[in-house]
Image (cartoon, rainbow, N blue to C red):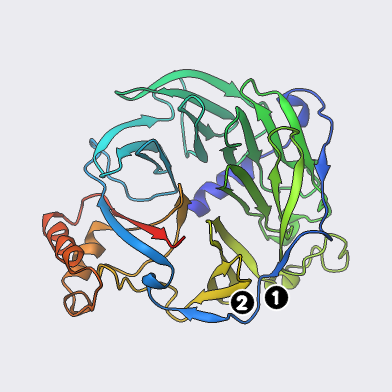
Amino acid sequence: MNCIMRRVIYFALTVFIGSCGGNPEIKQIEQENLIKTIPIVSKPDSILTKISDIASDIEYIHLQPSGNFQVQWIDKIVQHNDKLYINSIRNILCFDDKGHFLYESYGNKKEKNENVVAIYDFDINARDSSLHVLYGNKILRFKITGSGFEYLKTLKLGKLSPSKLDFVPRCDKILLSSTKVEGFELTLHMLINLSGETLSYKRNYFARFNPSKNGIWDEIIHYQFDNKIYFRERFNDTIFSIDPATNYFTAELILSSKISSTNSENINDPEYYKILPNVTNIFETELFLYYSYSFGESDYKIFYAKDENRKFEIDQEKGVLKDDIGGGPDFDPKFCSDDKMYSWISARDFIKYTGSEDFTEAQVQNTKQHVVLKKLANSLKETDNPVLVLVSLKK
């Protein structure tokens, strides 16, 4: 589904700065020689095999029936005020922290002649608890009430069609990011206010790269940590943040893959990028910077201990962590929100696992939780919504 959604985005995306509020002054700080550099590919200091190596607790939450809609795919999870908001591609669903379904919002429910093919992204504005849904070249804004989502307004972005949307924490500013289509876009990252006016943007310094020519598509990663928003492009090793007071784009960290925007000889050679690591996900918590990447035909998942300057790699052969706390299914980090890492497993696979020998013979730290998991499995039908897995990392 993500692949389909990206193709829709690639086809529709055209960057046009003027459509979002004039010609902003470029304010950007890049001090790459002064910030920390972490090589993406290097020998780990230790191999991780079980969840207790990095986590203090693990919780399993069944997402209760959500009206007439079955959750078959989870694209993003945001936790806010003891509620879980989930993008299931065409719906934003809201559950309480126990998994009870509260309400949902279809992207086109409140407007006429709208046809939402896919919700690209969403976020919650913590200042006023409003929901902002991005699809196509529009942002729909909803007020979150005790009974559901109340439609407020639509912000049209003109010819701009971004694929990522996140609020800068603690302020009414939105970071919009777009993927490269033609390579010569002026910018891929814009900071706007709630009226759609451009506050600042980061110039595209990798403009000679032509994805339509070489068939290698960009991927933008957003993540939040410690009241800051961060982002990284596939073809830029630098992780940037945004200063909420000055609107500056500031270089924070380099995940080095040896990509160079001045490498004119290889810049449009597809074979060149096949020998470079491709970062696919980044999270950050108090102790760890987690990142995953593909290299060759293999996938790697790293917990980088920031204070210790050490790397812990999930056993590359298995690619998951064994739940030695409650004895549940293996854990594969997929999301991070509110200092918790999330994964999910279908009801069918959860039932199958709890009936296996691996489950019944598991040596666990919390025997009570092991019993609860079996009871949960017995209460499920194979067609039920997935089971969320929440991991609290050590502090």
Dot 2 corresponds to which residue? Answer: 296
At label 2, the amino acid type is: Gly
Specify the label residue 275 is tagged with: 1
Can residue 95 be spotted in the picture? yes
Secondary structure of the residue carrying tag 1 is loop
Examine the rendered structure and indicate whether residue 317 appears above or below residue 23.
below
**206 to the left or right of 287:** right
Residue 237 in percent (x, y) is at 73, 60
Residue 143 in percent (x, y) is at 43, 22
- On the image, which quarter does residue 310 sit in? bottom right
Question: Mark 1 to mark 2: distance in Å?
Answer: 7 Å
Q: Residue 144 versus residue 210: which sits nearer the camera?
A: 144
At label 1, the amino acid type is: Ile
Q: Residue at x 24, y 74 (%)?
A: 364
**19 to the left or right of 392:** right
**CB contact under 8 Å: marks 1 and 2:** yes
Can residue 110 be spotted in the picture? no
Examine the rendered structure and indicate whether residue 179 appears above or below residue 217.
above
